[in-house]
Image (cartoon, rainbow, N blue to C red):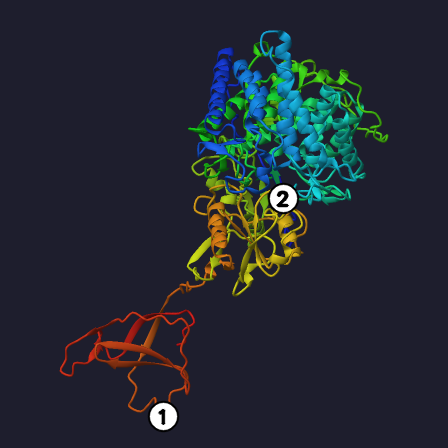
Amino acid sequence: MRSMYLVRTSGTGMLLKTLVITSLLGWAECQESQSMTPEERTVISDQIIEMFDHAYGSYMKYAYPADELMPLSCRGRVRGQEPNRGDIDDSLGQFSLTLIDTLDTLVVLNKLDEFEDAVMKTITDVRLDNDVVVSVFETNIRVLGGLLGAHVMADLLRQRGERMQWYRDELLHMAKELGHRLLPAFNTTSGLPYPKVNLRYGVLNPLSRTGTESDTCTACAGTMILEFAALSRLSGDSVFEEHARKALDVLWQRRQRGSDLVGTVINIHSEEWVRRESGVGAGIDSYYEYLMKAYILLGDNVFLERFNIHYSAIMKYISQPPLLLNVHMHNPTVNVRSWMDSLLAFFPGLQVLRGDLKPAIETHEMLYQVTKQHKFLPEAFTTEFRVHWGQHLLRPEFAESTYYLYKATGDPYYLRVGQSIVEKLNAYARVPCGFAAVQDVRTGRHEDRMDSFFLAEMFKYLYLLFTDKSQLPIDIDDYIFTTEAHLLPVSLSTTQTPCQGNNTESVPLSKEEDLFTYSCPSMETLFPNNPSFAKTIRDSYKYLTGVGRPFHPLPVREIELPLHDNGMEPVEFLRSMGISLTPLNEVFAGQTGSLKEHKGVYRVKLVAEVSHTTEEEEEVLPHIVQLISPPFLGRTVFTAGPAKFGMDLTKQEHGVKGSIVKASPYTACEPIDSAVELKGHIALALRGDCMFAVKARWLQEAGAIGVIFIDHREGSNSEDTPLFQMVGDGDSTEDITLPLVFLFSREGAVLTAALEEHHNVDVLLLPKERQLGHDKTEKLVGMNIKFRLAEEGELEDGSTRGPTLEFVLEKQEVFLKEEEEEEEEEPRGRQQPPQQFCSKAAENDRTEPCSADSSQTANFNSRPDAKP
């Protein structure tokens, strides 16, 4: 809430031209007990070990050798045997992903027997030549990084002579094999890698089922240097480092020279930017991380120079403490969206590495307040800290930054933050067969997935946070963490001469150079156990989201509002803005005091009470997908979410009808292969991997007349998950004219099953209120009708003008007819009125009204547009 509101009003004779209201909001500071005894730390450390045993043990018991554990189903996720989740499944290569990703975690947690056993299993059981298309980025950071980190640990243990004496660099040989299987992705004219590769057939082979992609994300191309350079230095083959450096060169050369920012998605052939929004979250994040860490690992100044130039631009345009907002790379003063994604939670940790602690503390505290409000970091949240995407995948980035900040400041506050992470994981994510992702933080519903990074990263950072270095089996300061938290030795910079000919052009740094521009700062030297340093920064953001704010009234400062004697316009104007004012005579009822008595002067206690609507209260107009072809005939209806762009179905009287066709590729994040089959039909496309607007443009270009997006999160459904409106990609979406609706996973599965069974399925897309087969329920209104008995022949001779109501009284029943002069018209949607008559036995056995008055008034329900 702002501390000052400036309100300008104008009007004839208005005495008040400018009203300044200064807020004196005060609240008592709720001091948390921040200190933590060594015994407490030991208890939490043991708890983390138990949690790891539960997660890793569940994987080995229920899932191995599958790539990942499905913790709700208590079985392994095998690609091709479970419903396709689109590009999410490109992490899975039938190479026991979770086992490899967890190897060096076992060493950090001092589980050396389990590590040795896991290495044996990896060498014996894992194959890397499977006929499967995988993500180059994910395979590099998870599998190649996992093999390298495990090799470094195995080699260290072998050199100590205590164990692993049988080890003969098998993991390094596997890493080199995998590196060669990833190299075909770099076979482009630009040097930027394809986003996907077939482990057996490469990219351009007719059997590869890939190679048609034209775009890749900045992070995907720029997050290779640590693993590839380490592989080159350890194996003696420079080809890997050369390719990774070339990709970084291209990204550097294609930065926007005016802002020194990069975009999110780039064309791997033309080197042109496809998505020009720039931030530090999804799509870009680890590109910046790897520039800094490549300097630390390899000792090459070129990476530090590039990082510093980018970092100055980030702090100038993207960092708006405590927020980190996406901007347009060519016009960086313009924010392109009003929400942030959870992946940016790594950035405070990167700022710690650079030594820039103040913004790191600010952003981390903002993130902590969001976790207090929602239990976990939502996958995306707005600048007002409301949920944008409710999913939480057990991501470790917030724990990572917490670890770095504690190591930098020595402030036990960050131990308490880590403790809250541990407690929430146990309370809200733990299930009998491991830990399950949260489908929506608002409902707490679980999702049947436990990604490998949970074991690779989360438990490393949490354990290191609560464990003294002296208790670790390795000297953690001798290693740099990759983006997947795998450990690479910083001594690599001296093991082999770096590749030549990779110097960047000389670009002078800005004048904003500081102490940390050309150094790897030592936090122990800069901020030796000075918790007050961090606290003074944090306190400004302690109640940022409004959670935990205590009420503590402060003495009232008198504010005079000179109002027109007979007019209250300024007060009403403020009220319309959500600002409430309370007269002091109401505040101090029963109190005595020397209050000034001036006509037209308001004294107010309350400065500002600004109301806002939470996302949960945001009205979302439900749409439907109604199956109208045989055998469904309109009886099968799915509730769907609308879009904030594209065709407005509320303005289409009869909705949009068409037969459905599944898009290929299913995620529709690239040119559509099935354009011929799709033209003139409604497309089915899977959510994920790119923005809804990107998918819509590709499908519209292919000739689709509508799109039904289907959620990729297993088990989601409209009953348990709040509907939301799909949003664009930050750029103008006026070019998108298709109707777009969104189905959750369960409803989408029924729809796709119907298509597979019947092949030709026609659907209708329309707002739920216009569903076929459901007449509108018209609001009934009361109406008083006076009537008299007509003389015989009066109606026939035309003496009555205008519409009339005729009661035809017959035995046992009453009918109400509406007639127009010389023309009878059947009214639409007629409602049968209640028959407020009773039978009375009489000599002539005629039916009469209950009232015997000569002037009768009957009270009927009729339609709002009924004519008198």
The percent coordinates of residue 820 (x first, y second) are 41, 83
Give, as a three-letter code, the residue at label 2: Cys
Q: Is residue 736 visible?
A: no
Residue furthest out toward the left? 843
Q: What residue is at 36 percent from the left and 92 percent from the top?
A: 797
Q: Left or right? Give the position of 198 relative to 435.
A: right
Mark 1 vs 2: CB contact within 8 A: no
The percent coordinates of residue 610 (x first, y second) are 55, 42
Give, as a three-letter code, the residue at label 1: Asp
The quadrant of the picture occupied by the C terminus is bottom left
The quadrant of the picture occupied by the N terminus is top right
Q: Quadrant of residue 219?
A: top right
* Residue at numbered disc 2: 690
Q: What residue is at 50 percent from the left and 13 percent from the top?
A: 42
Q: Quadrant of residue 321?
A: top right
In front here: 327 or 666?
Answer: 666
Mark positioned earlier in the residue sequence (1 or 2): 2
Tell which tag, 1 or 2, sits nearer the viewer: 2
Mark 1, Cα crowd under 10 Å, few <14 / some 14-19 / many 20+, is few
In front here: 418 or 71?
Answer: 71
Tell me, for residue 797, which label it has, or none. 1
Q: Secondary structure at mark 2?
A: loop
